Image (spheres, grey):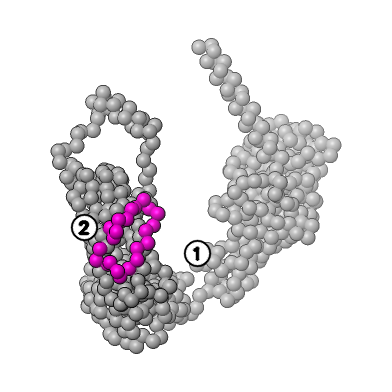
């Protein structure tokens, strides 16, 4: 037995807390009104997912036999009992009519057996509880066909007794469907005509249900089918009151049509069949779904020799002209001061159909510009983002895709300034889908400042410059700022003005990541500054705590 309610009961402490809360509300006059008289009488036992038939393979057939299963839940006509316990629930399964025809295999589910009666004490519960207490196997000599019934009786102290039955059939229908595949569309619409048959050794006598699903809307409906929507349905379910003996097969006498005009990447259509009343768990639309308004869908007998032993089939439709997605790599800029170690977010490719990365073959391949070297980041960052793996001494790197929203980064060291130096980022893709490979390579540019010169060579007192960087070893700038800049690492022989200028630049820019304050943002992040900023934050917190304690003492 297993619960699928998705809820958990409070333990002893939770019960006490709930009692105290209720008592407090009562004292304040806010307690809930007492339950109306006879509320318990509104409860009912909902019996769900009970198969109409339970098929048992003939003796000697080693096919898998699923356990007999049923779902139980609290129910009520007006829904008021959905959160109320059913008390002292017991499920009893009487298999007396199957004596001599089957052997009973009892599962370890707390149930007990006396002769051919299985008793399952379920205690108190609410919402859904699943019960799969036994499996049946046919005894030698039991003929194919109906053998008897499983009689289910469910009782509870506070709800009426429920009784159901499931017919036990010896033999198994092996339902078959048409072979699926891929179809090239010649227009904006597509159609599927389902076919199904029985390759088993016993007839399906209760009717057959056809379930059709699509990723795009259906064009038109049938009045003897149910739909998940009548405006733009994507699921249909049709019951056919037919007998399906072994060897028989049918095709629907009308097609299911689909509007693929908006499916730039193509779409899938699938269908499945099952004996009516034996819907898979959570698989059916239910009798309450809306019926179509079109014509009547019928069946025509066919030769089922080409059908496959599978109860479902699917077809993929390729857009008119074939599937083509144009991927383009996205370049970026490496900006900083010689001597710095920075990280930069590696952009993912874009495409013209919002197709995601289904036809990309990662990793992306990065060739660094001259003067820039990729580093191993395994000892630097331990976050959710991923990092490029350097190769060829850091001249190149391979960049996997990181999960959203973290992405992938490359950690680099700016060795020297090489005017005009550029690199490339290459995105490999499936060439059959993306035949235009010209834009699969993007340019990686540089804007690198020397330590001893330019805007990053030590700003003058009070000076500022857009995109500037405090130079390692440069003089401390009084009141200076560098909008969007990153701090520089200390150079040999430098003074403390280098790190001071970096902190000033970061404060002016609003964060170490170029103004956003978000470590996952695109752009450079100076590794030493991350550690420094953390120390500043801790120091600031210490000061605030000290001030608060002083004020508290003064009070």
* Vertical comparison of 475 with 203: above or below: above
Question: Does 298 sit left or right of 323 as displayed?
Answer: left
Q: Specify the segment rendered in magenta.
A: 96-118
Which residue is denoted by mark 2 in the rendering?
163
Front residue of 435 and 307: 307
Q: Which mark identifies residue 354?
A: 1
Image location (x, y in percent) of residue 341: 73, 46
Is residue 537 at all visible to an observer of this figure? yes
| SS assignment at label 2 | strand
Image location (x, y in percent) of residue 12: 38, 33
Residue positioned 14% across, 38% down in the render? 37
Q: Please identify the quarter of the rendering in which residue 235 is found.
A: bottom left
Front residue of 464 and 333: 333
* Vertical comparison of 164 with 476: above or below: below
- Determine the CA span between mark 2 and mark 1: 53 Å
| SS assignment at label 1 | loop
Badge 1: few (under 14), some or many (20 or more) residues near its Cα, within 10 Å?
few
- Residue found at the far left of this picture: 37
- Residue found at the far top of this picture: 554
Is residue 259 at all visible to an observer of this figure? no
Q: Earlier in the sequence, mark 2 or mark 1?
A: 2
Badge 2: few (under 14), some or many (20 or more) residues near its Cα, within 10 Å?
some
Residue positioned 26% across, 23% down in the render? 27
Residue positioned 47% across, 71% down in the render? 265
Question: Does 88 sit left or right of 333 as displayed?
Answer: left
């Amino acid at each position: 037995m297993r619960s699928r309610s998705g809820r958990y009961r409070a333990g002893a402490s939770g019960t006490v807390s709930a009692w105290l809360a209720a008592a407090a509300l009562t004292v304040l006059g806010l307690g809930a009104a007492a339950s109306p008289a006879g509320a318990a009488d509104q409860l009912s036992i909902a019996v769900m997912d009970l198969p109409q038939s339970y098929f048992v393979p003939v003796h000697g057939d080693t096919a898998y036999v699923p356990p007999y299963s049923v779902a139980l839940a609290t129910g009520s006509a007006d829904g008021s009992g959905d959160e109320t316990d059913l008390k002292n629930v017991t499920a009893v399964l009487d298999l007396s009519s199957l004596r001599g025809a089957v052997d009973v295999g009892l599962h370890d589910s707390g149930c007990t057996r006396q002769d051919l009666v299985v008793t399952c004490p379920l205690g108190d519960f609410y919402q859904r509880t699943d019960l799969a207490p036994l499996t049946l196997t046919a005894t030698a000599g039991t003929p194919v066909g109906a053998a008897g019934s499983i009689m289910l009786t469910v009782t509870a102290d506070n709800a009426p007794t429920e009784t159901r039955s499931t017919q036990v059939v010896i033999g198994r229908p092996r339902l078959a469907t048409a072979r699926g595949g891929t179809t090239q569309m010649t227009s904006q619409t597509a159609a599927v005509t389902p076919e199904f048959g029985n390759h088993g050794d016993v007839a399906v006598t209760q009717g057959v249900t056809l379930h059709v699903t699509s990723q795009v809307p259906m064009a038109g409906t049938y009045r003897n089918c149910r739909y998940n929507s009548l405006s733009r349905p994507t699921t249909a379910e049709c019951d056919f009151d037919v007998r399906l003996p072994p060897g028989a097969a049918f095709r629907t006498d009308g097609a299911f049509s689909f509007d693929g005009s908006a499916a730039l990447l193509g779409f899938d259509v699938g269908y499945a069949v099952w004996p009516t009343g034996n819907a898979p768990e959570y698989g059916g639309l239910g009798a309450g779904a809306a019926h179509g308004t079109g014509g009547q869908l019928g069946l025509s007998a066919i030769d089922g020799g080409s059908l496959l032993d599978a109860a479902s089939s699917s077809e993929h439709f390729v857009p008119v002209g074939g599937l083509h997605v144009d991927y383009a790599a996205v370049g970026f800029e490496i900006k900083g001061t010689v001597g710095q170690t920075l990280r930069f977010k590696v952009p993912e490719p874009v495409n013209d159909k919002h197709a995601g990365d289904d036809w990309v073959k990662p990793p992306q391949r990065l060739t660094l510009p001259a003067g820039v070297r990729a580093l191993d980041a395994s000892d630097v960052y331990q976050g959710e983002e991923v990092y490029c793996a350097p190769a060829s001494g850091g001249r190149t790197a391979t960049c996997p895709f990181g999960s959203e929203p973290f992405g992938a980064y490359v950690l680099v060291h700016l060795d020297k300034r090489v005017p005009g130096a550029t690199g490339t980022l290459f995105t490999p893709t499936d060439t059959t889908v993306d035949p235009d490979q010209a834009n699969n390579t993007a340019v990686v540019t540089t804007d690198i400042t020397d330590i001893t010169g330019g805007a990053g060579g030590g700003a003058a007192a009070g000076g500022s410059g857009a995109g500037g960087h405090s130079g390692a070893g440069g003089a401390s700038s009084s009141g200076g700022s560098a909008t969007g800049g990153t701090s520089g690492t200390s150079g040999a022989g430098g003074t403390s003005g280098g790190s001071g200028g970096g902190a000033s630049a970061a404060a002016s820019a609003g964060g170490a990541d170029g103004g956003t304050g978000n470590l996952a943002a695109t752009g450079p992040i100076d590794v030493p500054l991350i550690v420094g900023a953390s120390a500043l934050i801790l120091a600031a917190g210490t000061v605030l705590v000290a001030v608060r304690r002083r004020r508290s003492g003064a009070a």
